[in-house]
Amino acid sequence: MEGTDACIRRAGELYKKSAEKKSTVAVVKVARPNQDNRIDLPVIGKGTIEALKDSGIKLLAFEAEKTLVLDLEDVVALADKNDICLAAV
């Protein structure tokens, strides 16, 4: 199974190849059904933001209080620098 960053890059490539670009791409990061949150939380970090930037994707939504954000201040700064919206929902 590919990781989040590889999935983002693949989605970006598919979008770039698409003939119709009437909308933008959003990435939504959530826990799998029945995922044990005690030991296996969804994670995002600077690499995730770099993958979004490289793919031209401007929105990442993730589960608030159920996603681990590594280096939060750096992630937010990198997202801001690249006009990427982070939405904890």
Image (spheres, helix red, strand yellow):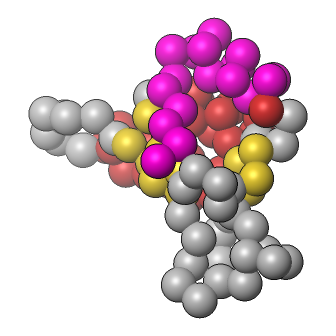
Where residue 87 sits: x, y (%)? 49, 37
x 44%, y 34%: residue: 59
In the displayed structure image, the side of residue 71 where residue 69 appears, left or right: left
In the displayed structure image, the side of residue 57 where residue 45 appears, left or right: right
Please say if 75 is above or below 37: above
Q: Residue furthest front?
A: 65
Please say if 22 is above or below 5: above
In the image, the segment drawn in magenta is 73-89
Where residue 66 sits: x, y (%)? 65, 60
In the image, is residue 17 part of the stretch drawn in magenta?
Answer: no
The answer to whether residue 61 is seen in the rendering is yes
Comparing 56 with 83, the one in front is 83
In the displayed structure image, the side of residue 81 where residue 43 appears, left or right: right
Q: Quadrant of residue 13?
A: top left
x 81%, y 23%: residue: 74
The answer to whether residue 56 is seen in the rendering is no
Where residue 9 sits: x, y (%)? 55, 47
x 53%, y 84%: residue: 33
Where residue 19 sits: x, y (%)? 17, 41
Please say if 1 is above or below 52: below
